[in-house]
Image (spheres, grey):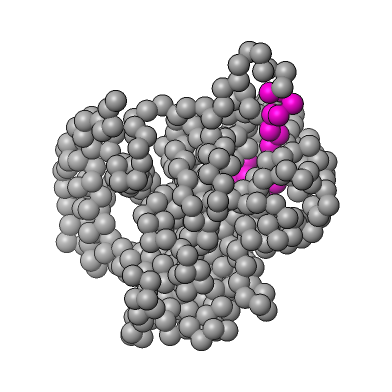
Amino acid sequence: MRFLPSLYHHPFFSPISTSISYSSVHPNIITTHLSRFLFFFSSMASSTVPIDAPPQPMNQNNAGDAALAVSHKSRVTVVGSGNWGSVAAKLIASNTLKLGSFHDEVRMWVFEEKLPSGEKLTDVINRTNENVKYLPGIKLGKNVIADPDLENAVKDANMLVFVTPHQFMEGICKGLVGKLHANVEGISLIKGMEVKKEGPQMISALVSKQLGINCCVLMGANIANEIALEKFSEATVGYRENRETADKWVQLFSTPYFMVTAVQDVEGVELCGTLKNVVAIAAGFVDGLDMGNNTKVSVSNKATSVRCMPVFLCLLFYLDCLSYQAAIMRIGLREMRAFSKLLFPSVKDSTFFESCGVADLITTCLGGRNRKVAEAFAKSGGKRSFDELEAEMLQGQKLQGVSTAKEVYEVLTHRGWLELFPLFATVNEICIGSLPPSAIVEYSEHKPKCSEVLDPYN
């Protein structure tokens, strides 16, 4: 059995075949290959499965067991229908048609809205097979059924995929209490946390506590619109104890263009997906202030040819010319790790090297909606509010980084950790108007101490 493909033929090490300048390399090309790089080496280190082997179905039912298998088929409902929710439904629907252990139909709960035409959003989705508001131009799959009634959407499901803005989850869970089957499994694709008097609560924990069900998480280096276009992306499933359940989620989401792996670290995976949005806000401030230009001007004015340069060298070259942004990412990753370990000492260091960790951080800081809106905020000198920019730029989608920064700040204040996390603290203070956007480059005057809190866990 062949466990390692030829390095030369592996897609990560394939050369760029046309002449390009580093300044023309799209960030998503860079991060796509970075994701492949991380997956390639993490596979060598931790897996006994051939990394170039095709995915294998979890269950193969004999012909004689067909009738029994039908009664045990899983039914999936996606709770949420925004940009990412619609993409998740598309991924899942493509797999339920192929996998014998799932019913073909995928229900998608839609918060009902009226479109400018006067039609209801659910009616248009079911008629056109397209979410014309949040994912226009993409067919979801004829087996996706939009349903505006939450209770009806989940009534037959035993696998629930939660993918809504995190601030709405408590109300959604309250509406589902007593409405679910006893054997329901959940998975959260939601970035964020609830901050209560007794302390912060992750969304997966909120789901488990209120609904009494096991809840895994899925986070990773991906941008919803690119997955919709079937560009290569990857993600990480975090689970607690039941590896069989985690494998079922991996099977449900995996496609040739969407690579999914599982790790036993729910809190680590979920906090990576949550905190990276705060760092992306900081990266957006830097872009809006054009702080990266001085560090790259000496090479950016030259069309440097890198014909046939290996992609990993392009990555190093590109990041060298974005040193300020890279510094934000490095410091942000350090604070993410420290904050996660202070809240949950069980969080594993290795999780930060999965797709949900450093790869997702880079992807979001270079191409996500949080970076984009924060850049516009900085360019306005902080004179335009995030609410105004969100409404103008996101067409109904919600910005997660600003609210998460506020929640993180509340935790830091309550526990006396503000001095340990100067980047997180500064991002929130800029967002609420206490500091100007330019303060993002001054926060480092406060000596960061978050590395000190990691020593007990090293």
Q: Position of residue 140 (x, y in %)?
A: 63, 32
Q: Residue at x 52, y 80 (%)?
A: 412
Identify the image quadrant of residue 173. Answer: bottom right
Residue at the spot x=65%, y=51% of the render? Answer: 214
Q: Is residue 168 left or right of residue 119?
A: left
Q: Residue at x 46, y 63 (%)?
A: 347
Residue nearest the viewer, comparing 434 with 271: 271
Q: Which quarter of the picture shows residue 446?
A: bottom left
The residue positioned farthest toward the top in the image shown: 63
Figure check: 122 above or below 96:
below
Residue 289 seen in the figure: no
Is 295 placed above or below 423 here?
A: above
Residue 275 screen position, x and y as percent: 49, 64
Q: Quadrant of the N terminus?
A: top left
> Which residue is most to the front?
64
Residue 411 location (% of width, % of height):
56, 78
Does 335 lie within the magenta span?
no
Q: Which residues are magenta?
A: 69-87
Quadrant for the C terminus in the image: bottom left
**Residue visible at 42% across and 81% down in the picture:** 420
> As drawn, is 23 to the left or to the right of 379?
left
> Between residues 244 and 127, which one lies in front from this camera angle?
244
In the figure, is residue 401 to the left or right of 71? left
Which is more toward the observer, 336 or 453?
453
